[in-house]
């Protein structure tokens, strides 16, 4: 699959997720088999880029190629300017957000709220594609609500205006993340456009990935929440695509992946912030291994990177020892 001049190594993408897909997590998922991994959503209002949160989201020059930055906003000129600025900072693909269901985004006529205003979508796509100088992609939902599923119309518009690829989450904005994703709309989008289409939503295992690809005819799979605490899902799906089954990682490998991720977070954010960010990742990593009880309180409250790392390693090492004794 190609996005503009970029030949992807696999039809697998990490979905951009606010508060999750920072640089350490993107790098990790790329190592685990994701061919592309967009940044967290970056506001198109460059006046807000001076916060620590925005500055962290703008760090991507040294990442594996192709580097993708997702921008969000509702004013065409600001979106175009944000695209230009991010390309100057190293972005090689600009992704436009038409999928975020959060109220604070939709209330500013951005994210999935844009799907209610196709003339505005046309203006944004026209200006961003003309300004960016790199491929532009689009992530969207199936529509604003179930009575207004207009993803097919927006997909056609996007292709006509030069968008290079699409990702479609099989829910409306009204659905948020509740209920089951529906893939009929994604299949309809794929039938109507010739550019690559990624299917997104509820893909949590290799079997589901293969089933959804067959059902929709999509060119690739985009995985979001299922990669939290399980970044190796990409290599598992990739193996399934080649007709093989990959064994789950051992507890020892899970521990090593987790500890390496924690160290990357400390390096990226600094100790104090890195420890706080690491807590949610620890919960995700360990949620499958809680048969021995809850995470130690100290692990979730310590402000010391060294102590957090030591406690996290000891927690999973305890399960490794239990498994060895039971064998």
Image: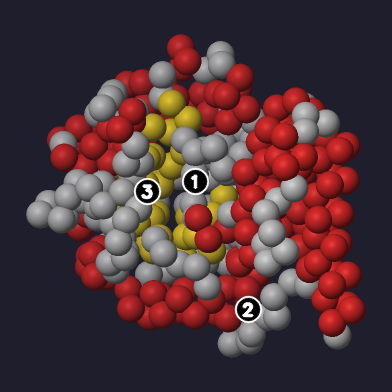
- Residue 84: x, y in percent? 47, 26
Residue at 77 percent across and 40 percent down: it is 298
Tell whether 212 sits left or right of 54.
left
Residue 247 position (above or below residue 290) = below
Q: Which residue is mark 3?
A: 139
Position of the C terminus, as image quadrant, is bottom right
* Distance (Cα) linking label 2 and label 1: 23 Å
- Residue 4: x, y in percent? 47, 52
Q: Which is more N-terminal, label 1 or label 2?
A: 1
Q: Which is more N-terminal, label 3 or label 2?
A: 3
Identify the element where label 2 is drawn. Answer: helix
Identify the element where label 3 is drawn. Answer: strand
CB under 8 Å between callouts 3 and 1?
yes
* Distance (Cα) linking label 3 and label 1: 9 Å
Q: Which residue is mark 1?
A: 16
Residue at 81 percent across and 67 percent down: it is 319
Residue at 84 percent across and 72 percent down: it is 322
Identify the element where label 1 is drawn. Answer: loop
Q: Which of the 4 image quarters holds residue 81?
A: top left
Label 2 environment density (alpha carbons within 10 Å; few <14, some 14–19, many ≥20): some
């Amino acid at each position: 699959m190609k996005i503009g001049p970029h030949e992807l190594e696999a039809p697998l993408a990490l979905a951009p997720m606010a508060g999750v897909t920072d640089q350490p997590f993107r790098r990790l998922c790329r190592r685990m088999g994701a061919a592309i991994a967009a940044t967290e959503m970056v506001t198109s209002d460059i006046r807000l880029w001076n916060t620590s949160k925005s500055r962290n989201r703008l760090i991507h020059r040294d990442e594996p190629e192709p580097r993708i930055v997702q921008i969000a906003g509702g004013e065409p000129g600001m979106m175009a300017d944000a695209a230009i600025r991010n390309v100057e900072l190293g972005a090689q693909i600009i992704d436009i957000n038409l999928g975020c269901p959060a109220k604070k985004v939709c209330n500013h006529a951005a994210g999935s709220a844009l799907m209610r205003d196709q003339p505005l979508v046309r203006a944004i796509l026209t200006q961003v594609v003309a300004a960016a100088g790199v491929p532009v992609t689009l992530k969207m939902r199936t529509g604003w609500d179930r009575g207004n599923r207009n993803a097919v119309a927006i997909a056609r518009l996007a292709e006509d205006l030069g968008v290079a690829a699409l990702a479609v989450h099989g829910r409306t904005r009204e659905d948020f993340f509740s209920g089951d994703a529906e893939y009929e709309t994604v299949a309809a989008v794929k039938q109507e456009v010739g550019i690559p289409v990624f299917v997104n939503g509820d893909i949590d295992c290799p079997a589901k990935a293969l089933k959804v690809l067959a059902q929709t005819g999509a060119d690739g799979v985009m995985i979001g929440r299922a990669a939290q605490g399980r970044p190796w899902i990409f290599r598992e799906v990739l193996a399934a695509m080649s007709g093989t089954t990959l064994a789950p990682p051992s507890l020892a490998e899970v521990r090593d992946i987790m500890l390496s991720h924690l160290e990357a977070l400390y390096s990226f954010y600094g100790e104090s912030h890195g420890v706080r960010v690491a807590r949610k990742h620890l919960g995700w990593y360990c949620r499958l291994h809680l048969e021995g009880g809850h995470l130690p309180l100290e692990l979730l409250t310590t402000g010391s990177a060294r102590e957090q790392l030591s406690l996290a390693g000891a927690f999973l090492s305890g399960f490794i020892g239990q498994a060895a004794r039971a064998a």
